[in-house]
Protein backbone atom coordinates (compact mmCIF):
# COMPACT_ATOMS: atom_id res chain seq x y z
CA UNK A 1 0.00 0.00 0.00
CA UNK A 2 1.30 3.38 -0.99
CA UNK A 3 1.68 5.63 2.04
CA UNK A 4 3.23 8.51 0.16
CA UNK A 5 -0.03 10.43 -0.29
CA UNK A 6 -1.65 13.02 1.93
CA UNK A 7 -3.04 10.29 4.17
CA UNK A 8 0.36 8.81 4.88
CA UNK A 9 0.23 7.07 8.26
CA UNK A 10 2.00 9.20 10.91
CA UNK A 11 4.32 7.43 13.27
CA UNK A 12 4.61 8.22 16.92
CA UNK A 13 7.76 9.84 18.18
CA UNK A 14 8.92 6.65 19.82
CA UNK A 15 8.17 4.58 16.71
CA UNK A 16 10.06 7.10 14.61
CA UNK A 17 13.03 6.79 16.89
CA UNK A 18 13.23 3.01 16.70
CA UNK A 19 11.97 2.44 13.14
CA UNK A 20 14.70 0.74 11.16
CA UNK A 21 12.94 1.09 7.81
CA UNK A 22 14.67 4.41 7.24
CA UNK A 23 18.11 3.08 7.96
CA UNK A 24 20.45 2.73 4.99
CA UNK A 25 21.02 -0.76 3.76
CA UNK A 26 23.87 -2.48 5.47
CA UNK A 27 25.91 -5.00 3.72
CA UNK A 28 26.69 -6.48 7.07
CA UNK A 29 23.67 -7.81 8.99
CA UNK A 30 25.63 -7.67 12.20
CA UNK A 31 26.33 -3.96 11.73
CA UNK A 32 22.69 -3.37 10.91
CA UNK A 33 21.64 -5.17 14.11
CA UNK A 34 24.12 -3.13 16.13
CA UNK A 35 22.85 0.15 14.72
CA UNK A 36 19.27 -0.91 15.40
CA UNK A 37 20.12 -1.68 19.03
CA UNK A 38 21.81 1.72 19.40
CA UNK A 39 18.78 3.54 18.05
CA UNK A 40 16.48 1.48 20.23
CA UNK A 41 18.56 2.24 23.35
CA UNK A 42 18.57 5.91 22.45
CA UNK A 43 14.76 5.82 22.15
CA UNK A 44 14.42 4.19 25.57
CA UNK A 45 16.76 6.75 27.08
CA UNK A 46 14.75 9.66 25.68
CA UNK A 47 11.50 8.04 26.79
CA UNK A 48 12.90 7.55 30.31
CA UNK A 49 14.03 11.21 30.41
CA UNK A 50 10.56 12.38 29.46
CA UNK A 51 8.97 10.19 32.12
CA UNK A 52 11.47 11.46 34.70
CA UNK A 53 10.51 15.05 33.90
CA UNK A 54 6.84 14.12 34.24
CA UNK A 55 7.56 12.56 37.68
CA UNK A 56 9.51 15.62 38.81
CA UNK A 57 6.71 17.87 37.60
CA UNK A 58 4.11 15.79 39.45
CA UNK A 59 6.15 15.81 42.68
CA UNK A 60 6.56 19.57 42.40
CA UNK A 61 2.81 20.00 42.05
CA UNK A 62 2.21 17.81 45.13
CA UNK A 63 4.69 19.86 47.18
CA UNK A 64 2.99 23.10 46.15
CA UNK A 65 -0.44 21.70 47.07
CA UNK A 66 0.83 20.58 50.51
CA UNK A 67 2.40 23.99 51.13
CA UNK A 68 -0.81 25.78 50.16
CA UNK A 69 -2.82 23.45 52.42
CA UNK A 70 -0.47 24.16 55.34
CA UNK A 71 -0.86 27.92 54.88
CA UNK A 72 -4.66 27.56 54.74
CA UNK A 73 -4.85 25.39 57.89
CA UNK A 74 -2.55 27.81 59.74
CA UNK A 75 -4.89 30.68 58.85
CA UNK A 76 -7.96 28.73 60.02
CA UNK A 77 -6.21 27.79 63.28
CA UNK A 78 -5.34 31.40 63.99
CA UNK A 79 -8.97 32.43 63.46
CA UNK A 80 -10.36 29.95 65.98
CA UNK A 81 -7.59 30.04 68.58
CA UNK A 82 -8.40 32.37 71.53
CA UNK A 83 -6.12 35.38 71.66
CA UNK A 84 -3.48 35.42 74.35
CA UNK A 85 -3.93 39.08 75.12
CA UNK A 86 -7.47 40.46 74.97
CA UNK A 87 -8.03 44.22 74.93
CA UNK A 88 -8.63 46.07 78.16
CA UNK A 89 -11.72 48.27 78.11
CA UNK A 90 -11.97 51.66 79.76
CA UNK A 91 -8.35 51.56 80.91
CA UNK A 92 -6.02 54.54 80.69
CA UNK A 93 -2.98 54.55 78.44
CA UNK A 94 -0.54 52.93 78.45
CA UNK A 95 -2.52 49.68 78.54
CA UNK A 96 -1.30 47.50 81.43
CA UNK A 97 -0.44 43.85 81.08
CA UNK A 98 -3.48 41.64 81.66
CA UNK A 99 -3.01 38.73 84.03
CA UNK A 100 -4.77 35.49 83.12
CA UNK A 101 -5.29 32.65 85.55
CA UNK A 102 -6.31 29.31 84.10
CA UNK A 103 -6.15 27.13 87.22
CA UNK A 104 -8.10 27.75 90.42
CA UNK A 105 -6.66 27.42 93.90
CA UNK A 106 -9.28 24.79 94.70
CA UNK A 107 -11.79 22.74 92.73
CA UNK A 108 -14.85 21.20 94.38
CA UNK A 109 -16.62 18.42 92.51
CA UNK A 110 -19.76 16.43 93.19
CA UNK A 111 -22.49 18.94 92.34
CA UNK A 112 -24.22 16.58 89.85
CA UNK A 113 -25.48 19.35 87.58
CA UNK A 114 -25.03 23.00 86.69
CA UNK A 115 -24.05 25.20 89.62
CA UNK A 116 -26.63 27.99 89.41
CA UNK A 117 -25.81 30.00 92.53
CA UNK A 118 -23.19 30.13 95.25
CA UNK A 119 -22.72 32.06 98.50
CA UNK A 120 -20.09 32.30 101.24
CA UNK A 121 -21.07 31.91 104.88
CA UNK A 122 -20.63 35.18 106.81
CA UNK A 123 -17.49 33.86 108.52
CA UNK A 124 -15.99 32.59 105.23
CA UNK A 125 -15.60 28.99 106.39
CA UNK A 126 -18.35 27.40 104.29
CA UNK A 127 -19.90 27.64 100.84
CA UNK A 128 -23.51 26.94 99.87
CA UNK A 129 -24.35 26.12 96.26
CA UNK A 130 -27.60 25.58 94.41
CA UNK A 131 -27.77 23.11 91.58
CA UNK A 132 -29.79 22.20 88.54
CA UNK A 133 -30.50 18.80 90.07
CA UNK A 134 -32.58 20.40 92.84
CA UNK A 135 -30.09 20.11 95.69
CA UNK A 136 -28.34 22.62 97.91
CA UNK A 137 -24.89 21.55 99.05
CA UNK A 138 -22.72 22.94 101.81
CA UNK A 139 -18.93 22.72 101.57
CA UNK A 140 -15.94 23.34 103.79
CA UNK A 141 -14.31 26.34 102.12
CA UNK A 142 -10.79 25.29 103.14
CA UNK A 143 -10.78 21.59 102.29
CA UNK A 144 -13.58 21.27 99.73
CA UNK A 145 -15.19 18.53 101.81
CA UNK A 146 -18.92 18.32 101.31
CA UNK A 147 -20.65 18.77 104.64
CA UNK A 148 -24.32 18.54 103.74
CA UNK A 149 -26.76 17.90 100.90
CA UNK A 150 -30.25 19.35 101.18
CA UNK A 151 -32.86 17.72 98.95
CA UNK A 152 -36.03 19.57 99.94
CA UNK A 153 -36.76 21.06 96.49
CA UNK A 154 -38.40 19.26 93.59
CA UNK A 155 -36.75 21.31 90.84
CA UNK A 156 -33.70 23.48 90.07
CA UNK A 157 -32.31 25.62 92.88
CA UNK A 158 -31.65 29.05 91.37
CA UNK A 159 -30.74 31.10 94.44
CA UNK A 160 -29.13 30.63 97.87
CA UNK A 161 -28.53 33.08 100.71
CA UNK A 162 -27.08 32.76 104.22
CA UNK A 163 -28.64 34.37 107.24
CA UNK A 164 -26.37 37.08 108.70
CA UNK A 165 -25.53 34.87 111.69
CA UNK A 166 -24.66 31.89 109.47
CA UNK A 167 -27.12 29.48 111.11
CA UNK A 168 -29.67 29.23 108.29
CA UNK A 169 -29.80 29.10 104.51
CA UNK A 170 -32.62 30.26 102.25
CA UNK A 171 -33.01 28.68 98.83
CA UNK A 172 -35.16 29.66 95.84
CA UNK A 173 -36.34 27.15 93.28
CA UNK A 174 -38.13 26.56 90.03
CA UNK A 175 -40.65 24.61 92.13
CA UNK A 176 -42.07 28.09 93.09
CA UNK A 177 -41.02 27.87 96.74
CA UNK A 178 -38.46 29.50 99.00
CA UNK A 179 -37.26 27.21 101.78
CA UNK A 180 -35.30 27.98 104.92
CA UNK A 181 -33.32 25.29 106.63
CA UNK A 182 -30.76 24.72 109.33
CA UNK A 183 -27.25 25.16 107.88
CA UNK A 184 -25.73 22.55 110.21
CA UNK A 185 -28.30 19.76 110.16
CA UNK A 186 -30.22 20.29 106.91
CA UNK A 187 -33.53 20.30 108.77
CA UNK A 188 -36.19 22.28 106.95
CA UNK A 189 -37.46 25.12 109.11
CA UNK A 190 -39.80 27.00 106.81
CA UNK A 191 -41.38 26.88 103.34
CA UNK A 192 -42.74 30.01 101.70
CA UNK A 193 -45.29 29.44 98.92
CA UNK A 194 -46.35 32.97 98.00
CA UNK A 195 -45.11 32.90 94.39
CA UNK A 196 -47.01 31.39 91.49
CA UNK A 197 -44.03 30.68 89.22
CA UNK A 198 -40.28 30.04 89.27
CA UNK A 199 -38.39 31.87 92.02
CA UNK A 200 -35.11 33.10 90.54
CA UNK A 201 -33.46 34.91 93.43
CA UNK A 202 -33.48 35.23 97.18
CA UNK A 203 -31.78 37.69 99.54
CA UNK A 204 -31.59 37.91 103.30
CA UNK A 205 -31.82 41.35 104.88
CA UNK A 206 -28.60 42.37 106.69
CA UNK A 207 -30.54 42.76 109.94
CA UNK A 208 -31.68 39.13 109.61
CA UNK A 209 -35.40 39.75 109.99
CA UNK A 210 -36.72 39.52 106.42
CA UNK A 211 -36.22 37.66 103.17
CA UNK A 212 -36.89 39.08 99.69
CA UNK A 213 -37.50 36.90 96.63
CA UNK A 214 -37.87 37.66 92.91
CA UNK A 215 -39.96 35.50 90.64
CA UNK A 216 -41.05 34.70 87.11
CA UNK A 217 -44.51 35.84 88.21
CA UNK A 218 -43.20 39.43 87.93
CA UNK A 219 -43.23 40.21 91.65
CA UNK A 220 -40.77 40.80 94.44
CA UNK A 221 -42.11 39.55 97.76
CA UNK A 222 -40.89 40.27 101.28
CA UNK A 223 -41.68 38.02 104.18
CA UNK A 224 -40.76 37.41 107.79
CA UNK A 225 -37.65 35.21 108.01
CA UNK A 226 -38.78 33.61 111.28
CA UNK A 227 -42.47 32.95 110.66
CA UNK A 228 -42.87 32.98 106.88
CA UNK A 229 -45.58 35.61 107.14
CA UNK A 230 -46.04 37.64 103.98
CA UNK A 231 -45.18 41.32 104.50
CA UNK A 232 -45.15 42.98 101.08
CA UNK A 233 -45.52 42.39 97.35
CA UNK A 234 -43.91 44.73 94.85
CA UNK A 235 -45.33 44.73 91.30
CA UNK A 236 -43.35 47.47 89.60
CA UNK A 237 -41.69 45.32 86.93
CA UNK A 238 -43.07 44.11 83.62
CA UNK A 239 -42.01 40.48 83.39
CA UNK A 240 -39.73 38.13 85.29
CA UNK A 241 -37.65 39.44 88.19
CA UNK A 242 -34.22 37.80 87.97
CA UNK A 243 -32.39 39.50 90.84
CA UNK A 244 -33.00 41.11 94.24
CA UNK A 245 -30.56 42.70 96.70
CA UNK A 246 -30.87 44.50 100.04
CA UNK A 247 -29.12 47.75 100.87
CA UNK A 248 -26.61 47.48 103.75
CA UNK A 249 -29.04 49.30 106.09
CA UNK A 250 -31.89 46.86 105.27
CA UNK A 251 -34.14 49.78 104.25
CA UNK A 252 -34.09 49.50 100.46
CA UNK A 253 -34.33 46.71 97.89
CA UNK A 254 -32.91 46.74 94.36
CA UNK A 255 -34.46 44.47 91.74
CA UNK A 256 -33.47 43.60 88.17
CA UNK A 257 -35.85 42.31 85.54
CA UNK A 258 -36.33 41.06 82.02
CA UNK A 259 -37.86 44.48 81.35
CA UNK A 260 -34.23 45.83 81.27
CA UNK A 261 -34.79 48.02 84.33
CA UNK A 262 -33.30 48.16 87.80
CA UNK A 263 -35.67 49.57 90.36
CA UNK A 264 -35.08 50.78 93.91
CA UNK A 265 -37.93 50.74 96.36
CA UNK A 266 -38.66 51.19 100.04
CA UNK A 267 -38.54 47.80 101.79
CA UNK A 268 -41.21 48.79 104.31
CA UNK A 269 -43.79 50.55 102.13
CA UNK A 270 -43.13 49.20 98.63
CA UNK A 271 -42.86 52.71 97.26
CA UNK A 272 -40.73 52.94 94.14
CA UNK A 273 -37.97 55.47 94.63
CA UNK A 274 -35.85 55.15 91.50
CA UNK A 275 -35.78 53.44 88.10
CA UNK A 276 -32.59 52.90 86.18
CA UNK A 277 -32.88 52.23 82.42
CA UNK A 278 -29.27 52.00 81.29
CA UNK A 279 -29.30 48.40 79.97
CA UNK A 280 -30.47 47.31 76.53
CA UNK A 281 -31.39 43.74 77.52
CA UNK A 282 -32.61 41.78 80.53
CA UNK A 283 -30.93 42.57 83.86
CA UNK A 284 -29.73 39.32 85.37
CA UNK A 285 -27.94 40.44 88.55
CA UNK A 286 -27.80 43.41 90.94
CA UNK A 287 -25.56 44.09 93.93
CA UNK A 288 -25.14 47.01 96.36
CA UNK A 289 -21.68 48.30 97.17
CA UNK A 290 -20.64 47.65 100.81
CA UNK A 291 -21.16 51.31 101.71
CA UNK A 292 -24.56 51.46 100.02
CA UNK A 293 -23.74 54.37 97.70
CA UNK A 294 -23.55 52.46 94.42
CA UNK A 295 -25.22 49.56 92.63
CA UNK A 296 -23.65 47.23 90.08
CA UNK A 297 -25.89 45.47 87.57
CA UNK A 298 -25.14 42.85 84.92
CA UNK A 299 -27.13 42.06 81.82
CA UNK A 300 -27.63 39.94 78.75
CA UNK A 301 -26.33 43.00 76.88
CA UNK A 302 -22.80 41.85 77.99
CA UNK A 303 -22.14 44.92 80.16
CA UNK A 304 -21.77 45.62 83.85
CA UNK A 305 -22.94 49.08 84.84
CA UNK A 306 -22.27 50.96 88.05
CA UNK A 307 -24.50 53.81 89.04
CA UNK A 308 -25.24 56.14 91.92
CA UNK A 309 -27.82 54.54 94.24
CA UNK A 310 -29.23 57.92 95.27
CA UNK A 311 -29.55 59.71 91.93
CA UNK A 312 -29.55 56.91 89.33
CA UNK A 313 -26.67 58.58 87.48
CA UNK A 314 -24.53 56.10 85.58
CA UNK A 315 -20.96 56.22 86.85
CA UNK A 316 -19.31 53.49 84.80
CA UNK A 317 -19.96 50.95 82.05
CA UNK A 318 -17.68 47.93 81.86
CA UNK A 319 -17.55 46.24 78.46
CA UNK A 320 -14.91 43.57 79.04
CA UNK A 321 -17.22 40.59 78.42
CA UNK A 322 -18.31 39.25 75.06
CA UNK A 323 -21.44 37.42 76.18
CA UNK A 324 -24.20 37.62 78.78
CA UNK A 325 -23.18 38.62 82.33
CA UNK A 326 -24.92 36.42 84.90
CA UNK A 327 -23.42 37.51 88.18
CA UNK A 328 -21.56 40.36 89.88
CA UNK A 329 -19.93 40.64 93.31
CA UNK A 330 -18.26 43.56 95.13
CA UNK A 331 -15.06 43.12 97.08
CA UNK A 332 -15.61 43.72 100.82
CA UNK A 333 -13.73 47.01 100.65
CA UNK A 334 -15.76 48.24 97.67
CA UNK A 335 -12.77 48.87 95.41
CA UNK A 336 -13.20 45.98 92.97
CA UNK A 337 -15.97 44.08 91.21
CA UNK A 338 -15.98 40.49 89.98
CA UNK A 339 -18.26 39.54 87.11
CA UNK A 340 -19.11 36.10 85.74
CA UNK A 341 -20.14 35.62 82.13
CA UNK A 342 -21.23 33.12 79.53
CA UNK A 343 -18.07 34.04 77.58
CA UNK A 344 -16.01 31.61 79.69
CA UNK A 345 -14.40 34.13 82.02
CA UNK A 346 -14.63 35.63 85.47
CA UNK A 347 -13.18 39.13 85.35
CA UNK A 348 -12.04 41.32 88.21
CA UNK A 349 -11.84 45.05 87.62
CA UNK A 350 -11.42 48.36 89.38
CA UNK A 351 -14.81 49.64 90.56
CA UNK A 352 -13.78 53.29 90.11
CA UNK A 353 -11.98 53.25 86.76
CA UNK A 354 -13.22 50.11 85.00
CA UNK A 355 -9.64 48.91 84.45
CA UNK A 356 -9.45 45.14 84.22
CA UNK A 357 -7.16 43.63 86.84
CA UNK A 358 -7.48 39.86 86.46
CA UNK A 359 -9.17 37.35 84.19
CA UNK A 360 -9.99 33.85 85.37
CA UNK A 361 -10.70 31.25 82.68
CA UNK A 362 -13.94 29.63 83.76
CA UNK A 363 -17.53 29.28 82.63
CA UNK A 364 -19.35 31.26 85.31
CA UNK A 365 -23.05 31.36 85.98
CA UNK A 366 -22.40 32.63 89.50
CA UNK A 367 -19.60 34.35 91.43
CA UNK A 368 -19.16 35.38 95.06
CA UNK A 369 -16.42 37.21 96.96
CA UNK A 370 -15.13 35.82 100.26
CA UNK A 371 -15.77 37.99 103.35
CA UNK A 372 -12.03 38.51 103.87
CA UNK A 373 -11.56 39.63 100.25
CA UNK A 374 -8.83 37.10 99.39
CA UNK A 375 -10.83 34.66 97.26
CA UNK A 376 -13.53 34.48 94.63
CA UNK A 377 -15.66 31.40 94.05
CA UNK A 378 -17.31 30.65 90.71
CA UNK A 379 -19.74 27.98 89.61
CA UNK A 380 -20.89 26.97 86.17
CA UNK A 381 -22.17 24.39 83.74
CA UNK A 382 -19.39 21.87 84.42
CA UNK A 383 -20.86 21.16 87.87
CA UNK A 384 -17.82 22.35 89.84
CA UNK A 385 -17.01 25.15 92.24
CA UNK A 386 -13.70 26.90 91.59
CA UNK A 387 -11.98 29.04 94.21
CA UNK A 388 -9.57 31.71 92.94
CA UNK A 389 -7.02 33.90 94.69
CA UNK A 390 -7.68 37.60 94.18
CA UNK A 391 -4.06 38.72 94.58
Image (cartoon, grey):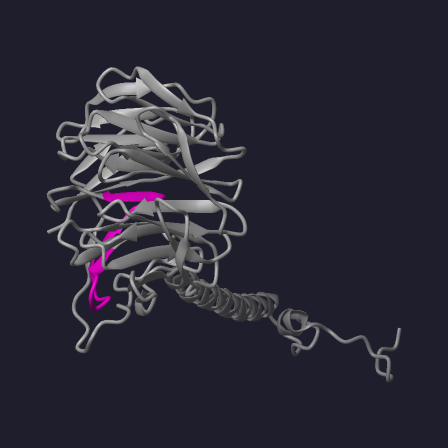
Residue at x 47% of width, y 22% of height: 154
Farthest-out residue, right: 1
**Residue placed at 20% from the left, 66% from the top?**
352
- Identify the residue at horizontal 51%, vertical 55% (top origin): 259
Furthest residue to the bottom? Answer: 6
Viewed as shown, does residue 32 lie left or right of 122?
Answer: right
Residue 301 is at least partly visible in this image: yes
| Residue 347 falls in image quadrant | bottom left
Q: x%, y% of residue 211?
A: 33, 35
- The answer to whether one can see residue 364 in this image is no
Question: Residue 97 lies in magenta, yes or no?
Answer: no
Left or right: 34 in relation to 163: right
Give the magenta range: 348-368
Q: Where is residue 302 in the image (x, y as percent from the top left)?
A: 40, 59
Answer left or right for 339 relative to 358. Answer: right
- Depth check: give the residue in front, 128 or 52: 128
Residue furthest front as drawn: 269
Percent x, y of residue 156: 44, 30
Q: Nearer the viewer, residue 79 or 355?
A: 355
From the top left corner, tell me how far across and down residue 341 is, in percent.
36, 51
Considering only vertical position in the picture, is 296 above or below 154?
below
Amino acid sequence: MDNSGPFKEEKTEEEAEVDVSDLPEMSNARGSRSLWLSRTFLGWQRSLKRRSWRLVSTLGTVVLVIAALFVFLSSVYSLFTPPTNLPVHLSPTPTPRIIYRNHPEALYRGQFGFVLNVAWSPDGTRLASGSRNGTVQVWDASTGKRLLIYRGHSNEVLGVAWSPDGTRIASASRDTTVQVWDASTGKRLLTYRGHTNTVYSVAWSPDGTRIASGSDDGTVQVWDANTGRHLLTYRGHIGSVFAVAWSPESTLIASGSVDRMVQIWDASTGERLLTYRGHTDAVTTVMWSPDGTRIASGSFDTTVQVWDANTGKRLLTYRGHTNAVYSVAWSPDGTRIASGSDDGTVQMWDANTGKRLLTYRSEAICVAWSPDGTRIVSGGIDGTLKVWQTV
